[in-house]
Image: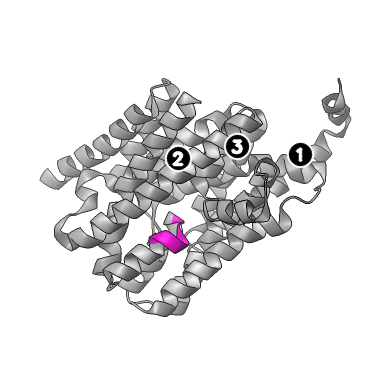
Amino acid sequence: MRDVVRASVVIGVASGIYAISFGVLSVSAGGSILQTCLLSLLVFTGASQFSAVSVISAGGSVASAVSGGLLLAARNGVYGLALSPSIKGSLAKRMLAAQFVIDETTAMSSAAPDQRAKDWAFWSCAVMLFTCWNLGTLIGALAGSSIDPETFGLDAAFPVVFVAMVAPHLSSRSGRRAAFIGAMVTVALTPILPIGLPILLSSVGVFVGLVSHDGDNAPDHSLEVGP
Amino acid sequence: MSWWLVLWLSVGAYVFKVLGLVVLGGRQLPAVVNRCLALIPAALLAALIMKDTLTTGQELVLDARLVGVCVAAGATFRRLPLTAVLILGVGSTALVRAAVGLI
């Protein structure tokens, strides 16, 4: 369990640093400190927050900022489906857990080997992320535009952490295939579709890829039901 | 910034999370769907890496982030701890950006 908690701390700190740039961006887009902090507390899904604030900052309408942000947030619904077998308990507990269903908690939980490890992975990651993300946002909002996150390479913090997180999923052939489809779909569709849609469609690519693959190898299927 | 933005994003984001985890989740799903769901993190993380590395808004761009992510991939492949991956990735991005700025 110690490894899991240690990873959660690192992920928490990384996103806390990244959250500083969200705070800076949101305030410079005209958000108040209260609005900026509420976005991190209530929306709590980084990509959507960044996308919405950057649309506003570029002079876009509230409707386009919200729709782009929600398209990016839709993947959390898919994550929730994927996590639902491993998050057990009362309705109230699951309603609380729902707020923490995002990229990092899903990646940590899904990479854990058994139920106990999954619980530890999900909740330690959730607590660390929520704390650091909101603390970082507050610091960034207070600092305003007096710091430039890009100078320190902080805009690379998310993809860098995601690289480490995707690695365990690449040990299987189907995992590599899913990652490849996801990456290709995103790169191909980003220039032609609204923000958020390519990310969502990359998960649809998995279904298409897997289902067609299952059809091709129908005889092999029986092997998987063995003892 | 409009309060409507805060309200709609907050409500919408939570609705998606609850919809997946609580409303649709917990039902018995066909085996093939479960196998697909297990692959979702791989696909979406890879997609997010591409989005965060190669795009700004709707444009494809090549900049210092790509170097940082490649360094991080190398560090991950060498099985370095997450802290090292993070510092190397972010640090190399900052270095390349500073170097390019000097030219």
Q: Nearer the viewer, residue A38 or A102?
A: A38
Bin the neighbour count of mark 3 within 10 Å (Cα to Cα): few under 14, some 14-19, many 20 and up: many
In the image, taking residue A85 as reference, residue A74 lies left or right, namely: left
Q: Tell me the quadrant of the picture where the C terminus of chain A can be found.
A: top right
Report the chain holding disc 2.
Answer: A
Q: Residue at x 49, y 74 (%)?
A: B8
Report the chain holding disc 3.
Answer: A
Q: Residue at x 43, y 36 (%)?
A: A8
- Residue B46 seen in render: no
In the structure shown, which secondary structural element does the residue marked by tag 2 occupy? helix
Is the same chain shared between marks 2 and 1? Answer: yes
Identity of the amino acid at label 3?
Answer: Ser
Task: Name the residue beneath numbered marker 2.
Answer: A162
Task: Name the residue beneath numbered marker 3.
Answer: A110
Provide the residue span drawn in magenta. A40-45
Task: Name the residue beneath numbered marker 1.
Answer: A213
Report the chain holding disc 1.
Answer: A
What predominant SS class does the magenta segment belong to? helix
User: Along the polypeptide, which appears first: circle 1 or circle 3?
Assistant: 3
What distance separates the C-alpha of mark 2 from that of mark 1? 26 Å
In the structure shown, which secondary structural element does the residue marked by tag 3 occupy? helix
Q: Position of residue B35 (x, y in %)?
A: 73, 39
